[in-house]
Image: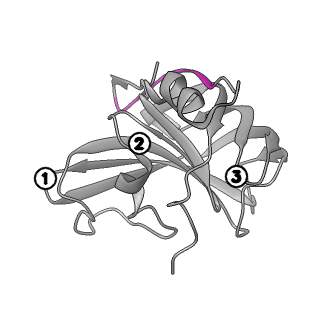
Amino acid sequence: MNPINFILPLLIGCGTEYSVDIAGEINGQPFSPTTSVWGGPFIVFAEQDLDCMDLFWIQKGLTTGEEAPVDYDVRLLQVTYNASDVVAGNYDLTGQAPVKAEVIEISGDMMTITKASEGSLNVGAAADTGTASGDFSFFFNDSGGIGGNFVIPWCANLKSRY
């Protein structure tokens, strides 16, 4: 469990509890996030302890082979809405879906992106600058799948950038 899930409520003085229960495997490796946040059109689950400021580089339209936007190694699941904000609802990732999910792996100066080929996302709440909650299951062709549920904090640094 991410330490922010326990520390942030103490710092802001509210009783909100964050939780993430996600499991799966991508490219033969288990996926186990330690940082989970949402903001703008993004929901992010990272396998590295990062704070909100570390996620300045998250954006729409990243592609495999581009030079890495940061100088640290990380693997994360990025859910991106076509709209400008995360919106509560049930979404199917097939066809012309209003959301997409991709695993972004940065190693050295290279970036690899594995896009979900199918799956579903259910967001029950995404309240202004509060929490977002929901569940999902994403499948990445022959590369594996990730699924689970979440209640995660808002990150001011996540916003649309083109």
Q: Is residue 6 left or right of residue 90?
A: left
Find residue 76 and name its label: 2
- Check disc 1 and report the residue beneath it: 108
Q: Secondary structure at mark 2?
A: strand
Q: CA distance from mark 1 to mark 2?
A: 15 Å
Of badges 3 and 2, nearer the viewer stands 3
Q: Is residue 115 left or right of residue 111?
A: right
Q: Position of residue 160 (x, y in %)?
A: 58, 72
Q: Residue at x 71, y 24 (%)?
A: 15
Q: CA distance from mark 3 to mark 1?
A: 33 Å
Q: Is residue 107 left or right of residue 7?
A: left
Q: Residue at x 69, y 30 (%)?
A: 14
Amino acid beneath label 3? Thr
Amino acid beneath label 1? Gly
Q: Position of residue 161 (x, y in %)?
A: 52, 76
Q: Secondary structure at mark 1?
A: loop
Q: Which residues are magenta?
A: 18-27
Q: Secondary structure at mark 3?
A: loop
- Check disc 3 and report the residue beneath it: 129
Find residue 20 and name its label: none
